[in-house]
Image: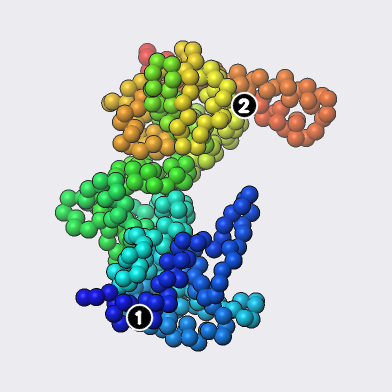
C-alpha cells in the first residue's frame, strides 16, 4: 500500500511535512554564550521541541484547522494515543500578539515520527527513525526518565504509598514500571517514550529476550483502573546495564534505587573488614582510572560506614531504611559520625596520597598516577561478591565492564584512623577562629568536630572489640 499521507492526504504531505522536516533541522532556540536566542522564523513554521507546534498567522488559522482535522482522523484510525494529560489531539494556543496563533500536536514525538516514517514519502526520504524525539533529546533518552525510574524503585524499596512503582515480575524476573495514567503526566509520558524506544535500545546493546518472551516490552492497563503497567522482558542485570549506558543521571543518582537492590533489597552494602573504595581500570603499574562518578566517590564510602555503624554500634536500634543512603553522604553516617562528604573525600585523598581527586570527572574516566599507597589493596573481583554487589549499586560503570576491573580496598580500621586525622586537623583551625571572632556558627562547628572524634573512636572500639571476640 502507498503511504497514507502521500496517497490520501496530499495537502498534509505538501504543506505540513516540509515544515516538520525544517523544524527538525532548525531548533527554535539556539544558545550563544549561555543565552537563549529565539531564531527568527517565517510563518507558517514548526518548532520541534518537547512537542510539535505549528505556528501560523491568525488569518490562516481556519485553513490550518482544516488540515489538522485530517491529521486527527489519521491518529484515530491508527490508534495512536494522546500524550498523558492531554484532552485533545490538537491544542490551539493563542499568543499575546493577536496576529499569530499555534497548534500543538499532543502525541508522543516517537509515535508521530514513526507514523510519518511509514505514511509520508517526503519524511521517509529525509529523516531517520526517532528523528523528532532525538532532536529534542540529543543525549538519548529523555533526561527526566532516570529520575522517574529511581523514584519508582525508591517507592517500592521504602514501602511508600502511591505511584510510580517498580518491581520484578515473578517468575520471569522481567522489570516492570507501573504508574497512574491520571497522575503525573511527565512520569507517564517519560515511561511511555521509554516503552516505545525499548526494542531499539535492546538491539543497540545486543540484549537478549528472557526465555519464553516474544516481545521486548508489553503494555497493559489494570482492569477498572487508570493503572498502566509496562513489562520489559530482559534480565534485571541487562536492564541496569542499559540504563547505565544510556542515562548518566541514573549512574549518578541511583544509589539507594538500583535495580540490583530491587532484586535483593535486604542485602547490606558491606564487605566486612574493609571499605571498598572504587573499581579501577589499571592502565599500567603507575596509572589507573577510578571508574566512578565524582559524586559517588563519597557516597559509596558513606553508605558502607552506615552499615558498619548499624552492625557494630546500633545493632539493637531500629534505623529507618532511608537513613542508610544519601547523595554524597549517608544520612546515618552524617548524623552519627558528624562528618560530611568533604571529610570523606579528604580521607579518601589521604588514603590515596593524592590531592587532586576532587577533580575526578563525573563519568569516572580520568587517569590518575598511582602514589605510594601501602594502605590500599588492589583486589581481584572474581569471587569478590560483596565488592561486586556494592559497585553494581553505586559505581558509574556497567556490570559488563565491572568484570574487567579491579577493586581498590582499605581495611576499615585503617580508614577510620585516616578519617580521625582529617577531622582532628580541623579542630585547631576552628579553635583559633572561634577565639579571634566568636560566633554561634563557629562554636557549633567546633563542637561537631569534637563530637566526631568521639564517635569515630566509639565505632573503632566497637569494631575492635567484636573482632577480638570473634577471634577468641
Comparing 254 with 405, the one in front is 405
Comparing 271 with 175, the one in front is 175
What label sits on residue 144 in the rendered view? Answer: none
Comparing 69 with 358, the one in front is 69
Q: Is residue 194 visible?
A: yes
| Quarter assignment of residue 212 | bottom left
Q: Give above or below for 359 relative to 158.
A: above
> How far across and down, in percent of the image, does residue 444 sit?
72, 32
Q: Secondary structure at mark 2?
A: helix
Residue under the point 36% across and 63% down: 126
Comparing 321 with 437, the one in front is 437
Q: Secondary structure at mark 1?
A: helix
Q: Is residue 212 left or right of residue 151?
A: left
> How far across and down, in percent of the image, does residue 412 sit?
46, 21
Front position among marks 1 and 2: 1
Residue under the point 52% across and 84% down: 61
Q: Is residue 254 visible?
A: no
Q: Residues within 10 Å of mark 1 (few under 14, many from 20)?
A: few
Q: Which residue is mark 2?
A: 452
Mark closer to the chain start, 1 or 2: 1
Q: Give above or below for 449 relative to 125.
A: above
- Marks 1/2: CA–CA distance: 74 Å
Q: Are marks 1 and 2 in contact (CB under 8 Å)?
A: no
Q: Which residue is mark 1?
A: 10
Q: Please give the count of numbered marks on the rendered protein.
A: 2
Q: Give above or below for 30 relative to 4.
A: above
| Quarter assignment of residue 11 | bottom left
Amino acid at each position: 500500500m502507498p503511504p497514507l499521507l502521500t496517497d490520501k492526504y496530499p495537502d498534509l504531505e505538501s504543506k505540513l511535512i516540509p515544515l516538520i522536516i525544517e523544524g527538525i533541522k532548525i531548533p527554535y532556540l539556539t544558545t550563544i554564550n549561555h543565552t537563549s536566542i529565539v531564531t527568527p522564523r517565517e510563518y507558517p513554521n514548526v518548532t520541534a521541541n518537547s512537542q510539535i507546534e505549528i505556528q501560523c498567522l491568525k488569518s490562516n488559522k481556519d485553513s490550518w484547522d482544516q488540515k489538522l482535522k485530517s491529521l486527527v482522523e489519521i491518529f484515530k484510525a491508527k490508534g495512536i494515543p494522546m500524550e498523558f494529560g492531554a484532552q485533545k489531539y490538537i491544542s490551539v494556543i493563542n499568543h499575546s500578539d493577536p496576529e499569530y496563533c499555534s497548534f500543538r500536536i499532543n502525541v508522543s514525538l516517537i509515535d508521530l515520527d514513526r507514523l510519518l516514517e511509514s505514511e509520508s514519502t517526503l519524511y521517509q526520504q529525509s529523516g531517520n527513525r526517532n528523528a523528532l524525539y532525538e532532536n529534542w533529546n540529543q543525549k538519548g533518552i529523555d533526561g527526566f526518565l532516570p529520575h522517574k525510574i529511581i523514584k519508582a524503585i525508591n517507592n517500592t524499596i521504602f514501602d511508600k504509598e502511591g505511584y510510580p512503582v517498580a518491581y520484578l515480575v515473578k517468575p520471569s524476573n522481567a522489570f516492570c514500571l507501573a504508574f497512574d495514567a491520571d497522575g503525573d503526566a511527565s512520569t507517564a509520558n517519560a515511561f511511555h517514550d521509554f516503552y516505545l524506544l525499548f526494542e531499539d535500545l535492546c538491539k543497540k546493546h545486543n540484549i537478549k529476550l528472557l526465555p519464553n518472551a516474544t516481545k521486548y516490552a508489553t503494555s497493559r492497563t489494570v482492569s477498572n483502573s487508570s493503572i498502566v503497567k509496562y513489562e520489559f522482558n530482559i534480565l534485571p542485570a541487562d536492564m541496569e546495564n542499559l540504563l547505565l549506558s544510556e542515562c548518566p543521571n541514573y549512574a549518578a543518582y541511583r544509589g539507594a534505587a538500583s535495580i540490583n537492590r530491587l532484586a535483593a533489597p535486604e542485602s547490606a552494602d558491606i564487605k566486612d573488614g574493609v571499605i571498598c573504595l572504587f573499581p579501577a581500570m589499571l592502565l599500567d603499574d603507575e596509572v589507573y582510572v577510578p571508574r566512578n562518578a565524582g559524586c559517588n566517590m563519597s557516597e559509596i564510602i558513606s553508605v558502607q560506614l552506615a552499615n558498619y555503624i548499624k552492625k557494630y554500634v546500633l545493632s539493637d536500634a531500629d534505623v529507618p531504611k532511608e537513613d542508610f543512603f544519601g547523595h554524597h553522604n549517608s544520612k546515618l553516617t552524617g548524623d552519627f559520625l558528624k562528618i560530611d562528604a568533604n571529610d570523606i573525600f579528604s580521607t579518601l585523598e589521604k588514603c590515596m596520597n593524592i590531592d587532586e581527586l576532587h577533580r575526578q570527572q563525573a563519568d569516572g574516566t580520568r587517569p590518575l598516577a598511582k602514589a605510594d599507597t601501602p594502605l590500599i589493596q588492589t583486589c581481584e573481583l572474581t569471587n569478590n561478591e560483596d565488592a561486586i554487589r556494592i559497585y553494581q549499586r553505586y559505581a558509574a560503570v556497567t556490570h559488563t565492564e565491572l568484570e574487567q576491573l579491579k577493586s581498590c580496598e582499605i581495611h576499615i580500621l585503617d580508614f577510620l584512623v585516616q578519617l580521625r586525622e582529617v577531622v582532628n586537623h580541623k579542630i585547631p583551625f576552628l579553635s583559633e577562629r572561634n577565639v579571634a571572632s566568636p560566633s554561634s556558627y563557629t562554636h557549633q562547628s567546633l563542637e561537631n568536630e569534637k563530637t566526631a572524634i568521639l564517635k569515630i573512636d566509639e565505632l573503632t572500639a566497637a569494631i575492635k572489640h567484636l573482632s577480638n571476640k570473634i577471634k577468641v
